[in-house]
Amino acid sequence: MSEILIDNLNKKYGKNHVIQDISLNIESQSFAVLVGPSGCGKSTILRMIAGLEDIDSGTISIDGTIVNNLSPKDRNIAMVFQSYALYPHMTVYDNMAFGLKIEKLSKYEIDSRVFDAAKILQIEELLERKPKQLSGGQRQRVAIGRAITRKPKVFLFDEPLSNLDAALRVQMRVELAKLHNQLDATMIYVTHDQTEAMTMADKIVVLDKGKISQSGGPMDLYHNPKNLFVGGFIGSPKMNFLKTNIVKKNVQSISLDLLGQKSLLLKKTGTNLKIGDEITLGIRPEHLKVSKALKNAWTGKVFVVEKLGSGTYLYLEKKGDPLVVETDGDSKIKVGDIINIAFDPDKCHIFNSSNTVI
Ligand SMILES: Nc1ncnc2c1ncn2[C@@H]1O[C@H](COP(=O)(O)OP(=O)(O)O)[C@@H](O)[C@H]1O
Ligand SMILES: [Mg+2]
């Protein structure tokens, strides 16, 4: 068991209020991902959980015990950094054994923990090498191995894959998911990369300027973003945003101006919106369909075609950002084609002038 409760956490650096009233519950043995753009406070939260940073106000508890005043070594936590932080003059074995020697474990216990971790990470052949004789991916494995040998209740990862190339990042993502299943530990993983968050998390916490913008399961955030920031942050390619206004309204529905061509009828009851109100329509590229019919459709010109094999992304000209449409991999549509794009009314998100979903 290692449930983590964070209650009203605050941190200021001078006048910069970098963590603002963060409250969060991370279930025992779950994989939680804190995600958000650079500078939003991810590392600061992780460092406060680890005990490497003072807390201005609020509490952090692990398994029901407030740890605010516990030193890092007494929290039973291990942290893995983007920079690996290995000792260059020590072998892989010694890097992994270092913390255990300080804890004065027996030679037998240290050996068995290092070999077990090396086996899990498939780095048994590298134990006699020095860090400079390893690739980036191997170094990161050693850093993770060093964390495993400590048998912590909680693993904290701060952008551990950011220095690796794209293929290795995908491989390590899968290995970390496997590791999480093998070890009975709670994991908190920090990243700016929404793909890592979506693929690995049980629970995603989206941070925006020191505040929680929304938290929930990956598909919950994907389908039900509470605000424009989360709608735009989760999903790749990004959700399309169209600034528009209400042209008609009755009890059951509203009609929006669809890029000056026609109106789009959406079922929405009980909103405070009035005719003329400005709103933002959000729709994901995969919820736009190339269509022969003109119902709920907008006609535009394709200016870029991106082939991914499994799918094709079409970029259509419009005022402001292009409209991005996902279609099938074998699509024959070419640059310059004029096509109809149907908006699926059930997949449209409407954000009001405060960028909150309605
Ligand atoms: N030691 C520090 N002194 C002053 N400001 C800091 C310090 N560490 C971080 N900050 C500031 O706090 C904010 C959050 O930083 P950080 O938690 O590192 O963000 P992230 O990890 O999300 O990129 C940033 O504005 C950063 O400049
Ligand atoms: Mg950081």
Image (cartoon, grey):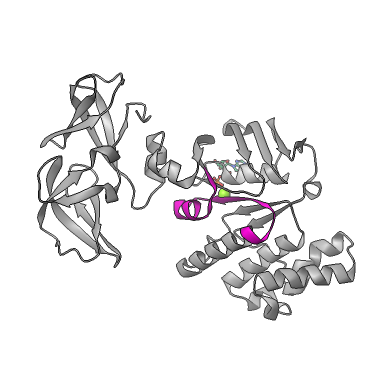
At which x and y percent is residue 102? 86, 61
Q: Is residue 241 above or below residue 251?
A: below
At which x and y percent is residue 268? 28, 27
At which x and y percent is residue 290? 17, 52
Residue 191 among magenta residues: yes
Residue 344, located in which quarter of the rendered image? top left
Q: In front here: 11 or 212?
A: 212
Query: Looking at the image, can residue 90 be seen?
Result: no
Residue 12 among magenta residues: no
**Left or right of 154 on screen, residue 106:** right
On the rendering, which quadrant does ligand 1 occupy? Answer: top right
Region of the chain picked out in magenta, as a range: 181-204
**Left or right of 273 on screen, residue 296:** left
Q: In front here: 65 or 240?
A: 65
At which x and y percent is residue 296? 15, 39
Q: Is residue 170 above or below residue 217?
A: below
Q: Residue at point 27% right, 29% down? A: 279
Q: Number of labelled discs?
A: 0
Query: Looking at the image, can residue 167 be seen?
Result: yes
Residue 250, located in which quarter of the rendered image? top left
Q: Residue at point 52% right, 55% down? A: 200
Q: Is residue 117 above or below residue 217?
A: below
**Left or right of 350 on screen, residue 299:** left
Q: Residue at point 75% right, 63% down? A: 149
Q: Is residue 131 above or below residue 319?
A: below
**Quadrant containing the C terminus in the rendered view:** top left
Check the image and name the residue furthest to the front: 252
Q: Residue at point 64% right, 63% down? A: 84
